[in-house]
Amino acid sequence: MPIFFLFIYNPKHISQNERSGSSKMIAYNLVLEALLRNTFSIYDLNAFLYCRFCRNVLPSDIAIEIEDVFFHLHKFPLLSKCGKIARIVGDSKNEKEDVYHIIGCPGGPDGFYLVAQFCYGITVELTPKNILMVCSAAEYLEMTEEFGEGNLLAMTESFIHKDILRSWKNCILALQSAQHSIFKAETLPIVSKCLNSLSTMVCTDLSLFGWPMMMYGSLQSPGGSILWNGINTGARIRSSVSDWWFEDISGLSVPMFHKLMEIMDKRGVRSENIASALMYYAKKHLPGLDRWQSFSLVPSVDPKDLLEKITVLLPEKKGKSYCRFLLGLLRIASILNACKPCKDSLERKIGMQLELATLDDLLIPSFSDSYNLYDTDCIERIVRYFLSSQASCIPPFSPSSDPELSPSSSPLSTVTKLIDSYLVEIAPDVNLTPEKMRCLLVALPESLRSLDDGLYRALDVYFKAHPWLSHNERENLCSIINCGKLSIDACSHASQNDRLPLRFVLQVLFFEQLQLRTTISNCLNGLEGDSAPTNTANDTVGTIVQRDGWVSLIQQNRYLKVDMERMRSRVRQLERELTNIKHDMGSTGRSHGLTRSKSRTLWCVPLLPGASDASPAIIQSTGPSPRRSSAGSHISRT
């Protein structure tokens, strides 16, 4: 029976002669010290490299180096069990002891140590925590039945099929241990078998796999009933989705979790279950999904890699909580400066269900080089995705999985109100340029809005926060608003708003008068009908005319109209009088003095509204009249 000595030291502290001459004495002393302390390993905290010595009566004739760890062993036990080592030694053709480098052995030094124990005839205890490491190392070293009956590979595969693949708990433990001990464990075939087994259990009834199914969840009996102090209460745990496995798989690494989700998707697991599992995993390892939650990194997870891999797996479905989750991922993607395909995928999925978003979720802070408070570029792209997705039908999650989904209003009207509220919220940003504000105002087509009150309210807030805008910039922004789509309240406010351009105010007054005339005319036409709609028409007229002091405004508009008609009449009279004067002046043919005396006559036309019936009054100058002056001149010359 060989004796195994475990020797760990720092080679930098030992010279070459000490290594060759006194290494065996150092090993025996350290092992004796370890045995007296009832330990099997000696750790040097300052060591960067360590060696493991296996000593027998015969000196070692082979040294295996795995990841800077040296194993001094014997050829016969290794070559009789390991086909790869036998081939390496055979190709070297070196009978003397030499160091053989084995690169890429799964499990590293720990896995090879268990393999060496098996080669020397020492019983290796297989557990769910080391089975994948031992099996992978045995497969890599080609420890098949060709090199001995009952070899390690066949033993580990039998253990996996009997005790690992049939138990949810053991399968989870094996995968969690493998991801820490094996580099890129998700690429190994044996790991793929375990992942396939997990996906099969997810698709099948829980009770078929025994108790316990949940390793970390609530206490429940094998049948699913809730336990209280170990007593079956008979109450069943109800859940809209099969979420019993979310917590267990959340302990897997990002690459292994990503591969598990891919396998589940290929096996036909419901999309809402996959989405819920992704949301659970992301919320556990990626804090900051909520707008009011501070962002913090989990040391064991690369958040950018997790975000990009989760985005690829997200299904194209609709759901209120799912939309909120997507907007949270987009916020994290902006913080982490994720790749463009990742952001584009999130924006496209959000655009497909923009009507389910809320205002708080759309307020994504800007983390780019711009000085804007919010990331308005991504919202503009999301709106474009929304408009392009209206031709296609995106299936929602089942109502049971998302009870908040309510098709009470059309998506177009909902998104219109949402974007108008968004514009009002971002308008106070002093760094928001007029060009960017205009792009956001025209993001939705004009035909989608029945009223432009939301646009007017956003511009009013924007002008108040940006008093330095020029007159042309204000007119350019106001030209987007259709004054005919403003409500009576908006028109009343705009007519008294001194921040608006004068031309826009005049347009509002014109459309306001036109709207009132049309509304009152329709209501009065309704009065001519039967008695049943008469009360309704009267109520409508009273509501329109009496609200917000509109009686006085209508009267003022009527007075203004009368005054304007009087002004036009006076102008026409003045034009006729001027024509007559010119005719008289041309027919007389008098001298220049006569013409100059005529020009001193002043015509004053009263423009007051009450003077419409009075004829033009002639106020003469202090000198003689034109006709008298001409007569006097003629007499004096004769």
Image: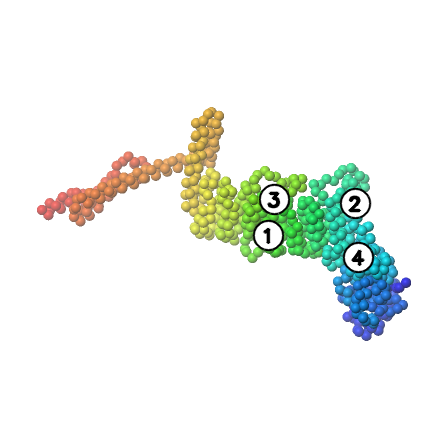
Q: Could you tell whether 87 is left or right of 623 in the image?
A: right
Dot 1: element: helix
Label 3 crowd bin: few (<14), some (14–19), many (20+), radius 10 Å: some
The residue indicated by pointer 2 is 209
Dot 4: element: helix
**Is 461 or 131 nearer to us in this picture?**
131
> What residue is drawn where x is 51% and y is 42%?
449
- Tell me how far mark 4 sits from mark 1, CA to CA: 42 Å
**Which one is closest to the eye, mark 4 or mark 1?**
4
Is there any visible trace of residue 370 in the rendered image? Answer: yes
- The dot on residue 394 is 3
Q: Amino acid at mark 2?
A: Phe
The residue indicated by pointer 1 is 344
- Tell me how far mark 4 sits from mark 2, CA to CA: 24 Å
Q: Amino acid at mark 3?
A: Ile
> What residue is drawn where x is 47% and y is 46%?
480
Label 1 crowd bin: few (<14), some (14–19), many (20+), radius 10 Å: some
| Mark with earlier residue (3, 1) | 1
Q: Amino acid at mark 1?
A: Asp
- Tell me how far mark 4 sits from mark 3, CA to CA: 45 Å
| Mark with earlier residue (2, 1) | 2
Q: Is residue 257 above or below residue 505?
A: below
| Mark with earlier residue (4, 2) | 4
| Mark with earlier residue (3, 2) | 2
Dot 3: element: loop
The residue indicated by pointer 4 is 135
> What residue is drawn where x is 65% and y is 55%?
304
